[in-house]
Image (spheres, rainbow, N blue to C red):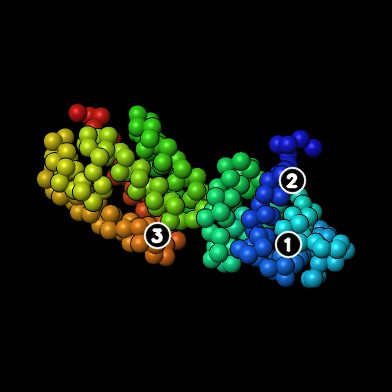
Amino acid sequence: MSELDELPAVFVRHAAAILGDTSKGISGGEIVRVCSAYAIDANVDIPYASYPFTGRMGINKRTALYESIMAFPSKWRYKIIRELCDHKVIQQFNAAEANKLKVQLFTRYGRFSGDASASDINHALIEETRHWLSAFPKSLDLYNGAQQKREHGVFDRNVLDDLRLALETLLHDLLGNHKSLENQLQPLGAFIKDKEGSPELANMFVKLIEYYAKYQNTYVKHDAAVVEQEVDFVFEITSCFMRHLVRIFGNS
């Protein structure tokens, strides 16, 4: 079997070191419970189906988790690692490392995810927005990063933050300044009017950006719990903002 056909042992070992960490990972009993449930669904035998771990002296959690995950085919390894990254214990005690691990998982081995997607985003809108952002590579990179994370179910606050930064970076390029999003309202209104937008549209656009910035401040800067159902809406409205701004900039 080639490397392309398998989620490699070296990555599984890395994941197990994070997810089975002595102080910040899931417990030995939880490793057995979770892996046993996956083993039933996948119809595979796992080396450690009871706790305390039996069969070898001094076996630790990381090794037990690694060897258990390696008993599964690659698509199941992917699923187990991805879902364990979202385990409540992991997110409580080691969220930063787990979210980094999840990004590595889907960027390197996303081919094992199957057809599953965490998002119902309008993909035609995304492709159009990418087209319009092609002349603005910094903003495009942030936008692409947000889309990748959303598609693979990675930490919604990171998605929102990437979207805010993508829009903010685009405004820096279009307006020729480096102001924060909250401080772009007056320059943005003037920009739209200067590009022959109606006063009504300019006022509406500015008001929407004002509320958008407040939403972002609540759910990103102040670390409030993100309402998952709202993330796709924020993604699509950000896309509409950027697409329209680049369009009128290009028509000048």
Q: Tell me the element at label 2.
A: helix
- In the rendered image, the quadrant that contains the N terminus is top right
Q: On residue 124, which mark appears?
A: none
Q: Position of residue 152 (x, y in %)?
A: 54, 50
The residue that label 1 is drawn on is: 61
The residue that label 2 is drawn on is: 9
Marks 3 and 1, how far apart in space? 37 Å
Could you tell me if residue 37 is visible in this image?
Answer: no
Q: Position of residue 116 (x, y in %)?
A: 59, 51
Would you say 41 lies left or right of 118 here?
A: right
Q: Position of residue 140 (x, y in %)?
A: 39, 36
User: Front-most of 1 and 56?
Assistant: 56
Q: Amino acid at mark 2?
A: Ala
Q: On residue 230, which mark appears?
A: 3
Q: Nearer the viewer, mark 3 or mark 1?
A: 1
User: Front-most of 66 and 76?
Assistant: 66
Q: Position of residue 5 (x, y in %)?
A: 73, 39
Residue at 35% in and 62% down: 222
From this view, report whether residue 18 is shown above or below residue 249. below
Q: Mark 1, residues whose alpha carbon is within 10 Å: few (<14), some, or many (≥20)? A: many
